[in-house]
Image (cartoon, rainbow, N blue to C red):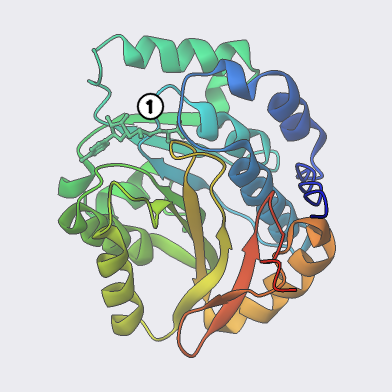
Amino acid sequence: MSPPMPLAPYPVSGLPDVDRYLEDGYAGVVGMSSRLAAAITCGLLRIQTEAGVTGPIAEIGTFEGRFFIALAHALAPGEKALGIDLFDWPNPQVLDRFHANCARHGVAEDKRITWKADSRALTSHELLAKTGGKRLRLFHIDGEHSRHALTRDLALATSVLAPEGLIVLDDMLHPGYPTLMVAVQQYLDAHPDMCVLCVIDRETIVAATKFVLCRRDWFKRYEERMLVDFKANVWPLGADFEPHWCLVLGLDTRLAAIT
Ligand SMILES: C[S@@+](CC[C@H](N)C(=O)[O-])C[C@H]1O[C@@H](n2cnc3c(N)ncnc32)[C@H](O)[C@@H]1O
């Protein structure tokens, strides 16, 4: 039997502040999102900036800030990160820990907006008021993991998204939340202008798979860049969304041994 192929390396975002945080700080902030997903999502923000795309980003389910801090470091000067959470779990002190983590890892107060709110009750009007009317270039959804809540969060994100914008969905294909995929498929069926840009494979059962969505007319532009920038992390077979295909990015890019 031949030895297992080596796993692929962690990708870098290509943004020095982000990559320093991913290397030295990320694992020390309590949270669930994977470092792989943070590197790729921030790499996508860099690709946007290089393409002239600007604007704020938002996250539902900011928790202690693990993923949020990476996103904030990926922004261009003057852009803001909006963190939305109930900030009551597992205790109310989570809000203080979020602010302390931002300060410890160099996210200045003028770069972030904290919004203690229930995402299920928010309107696009209220959200855009927080961003000064600016549409979002990236929206990370990692709040309540029910089909109903994800459907609502997806509707909110879509209503405030810039045309070039990306929606990142947490805990996709997770064994503990199998019905989330139903909400995603219903969303894709109802929004034929949107598609899955890539699947970011899970690292562990906690640091689970994320999907990145984009508008169809931006798909090729993003995919061409990802094929170059994340070449070492492309799983050769891709994901079949019937009939749409997209990249699968991971740390384990092996195929089944069939001979
Ligand atoms: C799994 S944690 C997020 C982890 C974090 N994004 C990370 O990468 O480390 C889920 C968060 O969603 C928040 N949440 C759950 N339901 C929510 C809702 N309806 N509105 C806003 N936040 C919500 C919880 O308070 C919790 O902090």
Answer above or below: position of 110 versus 213.
above
Name the residue at 24% across, 21% down: 89
Looking at the rendered image, the quarter that the C terminus falls into is: bottom right
Q: Quadrant of ligand 1?
A: top left
Residue 57: % across, % down: 51, 47
Quick one: which residue is furthest to the front in this view?
Answer: 1
Residue 189 visible, this orientation: yes
* Residue for badge 1: 63
* Rendering quarter of residue 73: top right
Residue occupying the point 23% across, 34% down: 117
Task: State left or right for residue 241 relative to residue 247.
Answer: left
Vertical order, 70 against 92 (above or below): below
Mark 1 CB in 8 Å range of ligand 1?
Answer: yes
140 relative to 216 in the view: left or right: left
Eyeballing the image, is 26 above or below 156? above
Q: Quadrant of the N terminus?
A: bottom right
The three-letter amino acid code for the residue at tag 1 is: Phe
Q: Position of residue 148 (x, y in %)?
A: 16, 57
